[in-house]
């Protein structure tokens, strides 16, 4: 296992001169473009030089810094293609990105640890400047993923032939626990059921390489149970992604996407070391060292959001009423469906005042789903989970409207289409 402080500057020393030269050339081309924004040719050259930088830092093991460099490159590409306006603010932001790359490398050469989260404040602005679909601190969270779970001390409780059926049964338990928790986040029974299902799945994985993700997933749920992790939308969304990983395991695919593993570890890093499992995972990956530098707090709401504050309060009340009606309906009160449909329709109508197409699409999906159910469409656990996820996404969007565009757009489009 390596830690941020273990970064070997030797390979970086060999290519540092070339990186500095490429960054200087990229900055020169950006300056040329700023002097004549009618000609985008300098931006093409700037991207070429920056692409060389991205490849070089990735080659020496600076994956987080490479991710940051990619975002600077994407902003330059958006400017070159006229996808965003080449105003002074965006040009200054691109220059700040190039400067941040240089300073980060200089800090590494001076002995600073490799903690890409230090770049998050400007990284967030880079994504916002081009209207990116999502944003997360986990984008710049790069622990050493070569760590493996401890070897199992017992044999798998199921045979190879029974494995798919066993996993499907445990997935059903996990889903029921997840739905229970989504409905009652203040209660712990659903989380305990989710944890028990994950522990049962972990027990079937006898090799460390295969057990690692499930070992971490149990720690993540421990974080929700005991470690002080708040039931925020990204956390709930991650629980749903773990459910999909269980499905893939039941189809005999043990491969886990690197991004999913990094997201799980990021939330474990944020949790308090309240259980033996949390302590073990935190220590194995040295997770606390990757959170040494926290990003700045979000900027305050802008003037437009302040003008919309009364409407946002009304929408928050409507989505709360819709959630309550949906909870009553799924708990066995069929009369609550009509109320839910009415709340969904008013939400859709009122939200148009925000002029946010992604939110409109999501609320359209909720309203149409309510109408189909009212017309007699069949309902099952999948429908319950999709609708609960959509309502949580809408609630999160309204509560955090000031910072909506980077984190919300892509998720809303996907969830709206599902409904």
Image (cartoon, helix red, strand yellow):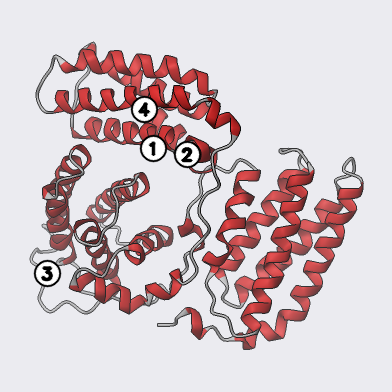
Mark 3 and mark 1 lie on one chain; the one further toward the N terminus is: 3
Q: Is mark 1 on a helix, strand or loop?
A: helix
Q: Where is residue 342 in the image (x, y as percent from the top left)?
A: 29, 13
Label 3 crowd bin: few (<14), some (14–19), many (20+), radius 10 Å: some
Which-is-in-front pick, marks 3 and 2?
Answer: 2
Q: In this view, does 16 lie to the left or right of 169?
A: right
Measured Cα–Cα span from mark 1 to mark 4: 10 Å
Measured Cα–Cα span from mark 3 to mark 2: 41 Å
Q: In this view, does 154 lie to the left or right of 12?
A: left
Tell me what residue is drawn at x 52 percent, y 23 percent: 354
Tell me what residue is drawn at x 51 percent, y 45 percent: 134
Q: What element carries label 4?
A: helix
Which-is-in-front pick, marks 4 and 2?
Answer: 4
Q: Position of residue 320 (x, y in %)?
A: 29, 27
Name the residue beneath numbered marker 3. Answer: 156
Q: Which mark is on residue 408?
A: 2
Q: In this view, does 299 lie to the left or right of 342?
A: right
Measured Cα–Cα span from mark 3 to mark 1: 40 Å
Tell me what residue is drawn at x 40 percent, y 26 percent: 313
Front in this rendered view, residue 58 or 139? 139
Q: Which mark is on residue 316?
A: 4
Residue 371 visible here: no
Mark 2 and mark 1 lie on one chain; the one further toward the N terminus is: 1
Q: What element carries label 2?
A: helix
Looking at the figure, which quarter contains the C terminus?
A: top left
Compared to residue 303, the image places residue 58 above or below, namely: below
């Amino acid at each position: 296992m390596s830690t941020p402080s273990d970064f070997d500057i030797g390979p970086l020393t060999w290519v540092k001169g070339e990186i500095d030269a490429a960054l200087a050339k990229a900055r020169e081309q950006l300056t040329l473009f700023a002097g004549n924004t009618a000609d985008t040719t300098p931006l093409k050259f700037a991207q070429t030089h920056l692409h060389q930088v991205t490849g070089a830092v990735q080659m020496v093991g600076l994956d987080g810094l490479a991710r940051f460099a990619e975002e600077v490159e994407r902003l330059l590409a958006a400017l070159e293609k006229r996808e965003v306006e080449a105003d002074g603010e965006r040009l200054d932001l691109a220059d700040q990105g190039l400067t941040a790359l240089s300073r980060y490398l200089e800090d590494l050469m001076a002995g600073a640890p490799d903690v890409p989260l230090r770049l998050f404040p400007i990284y967030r602005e880079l994504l916002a400047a081009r209207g990116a679909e999502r944003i997360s601190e986990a984008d710049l969270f790069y622990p050493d993923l070569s760590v493996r779970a401890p070897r199992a001390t017992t044999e798998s409780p199921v045979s190879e032939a029974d494995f798919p059926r066993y996993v499907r049964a445990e997935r059903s338990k996990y889903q029921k626990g997840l739905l229970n928790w989504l409905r009652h986040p203040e209660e712990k029974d659903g989380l305990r059921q989710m944890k028990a299902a994950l522990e049962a799945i972990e027990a079937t994985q006898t090799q460390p390489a295969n057990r690692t993700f499930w070992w971490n997933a149990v720690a993540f749920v421990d974080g929700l149970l005991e470690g002080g992790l708040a039931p925020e939308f990204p956390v709930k969304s991650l629980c749903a992604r773990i459910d999909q990983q269980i499905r893939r395991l039941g189809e005999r695919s043990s491969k886990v996407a690197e991004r999913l593993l990094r997201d799980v570890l990021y939330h474990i890093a944020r949790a308090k070391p309240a259980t033996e499992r949390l302590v073990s995972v935190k220590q194995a990956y040295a997770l606390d060292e990757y959170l040494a530098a926290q990003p700045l707090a979000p900027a305050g709401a802008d003037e437009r959001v302040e003008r919309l504050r009364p409407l946002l309060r009304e929408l928050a009340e409507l989505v709360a009423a819709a959630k309550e009606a949906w909870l009553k309906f799924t708990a066995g009160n069929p009369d609550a469906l009509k109320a839910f449909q009415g709340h969904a329709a008013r939400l859709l109508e009122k939200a148009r005042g925000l002029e946010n197409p992604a939110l409109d699409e999501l609320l359209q999906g909720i309203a149409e789903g309510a109408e189909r159910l009212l017309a007699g469409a069949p309902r099952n656990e999948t429908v319950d989970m999709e609708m609960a996820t959509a309502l949580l996404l809408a609630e999160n969007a309204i509560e955090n409207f000031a910072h909506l565009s980077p984190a919300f757009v892509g998720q809303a489009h996907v969830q709206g289409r599902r409904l």
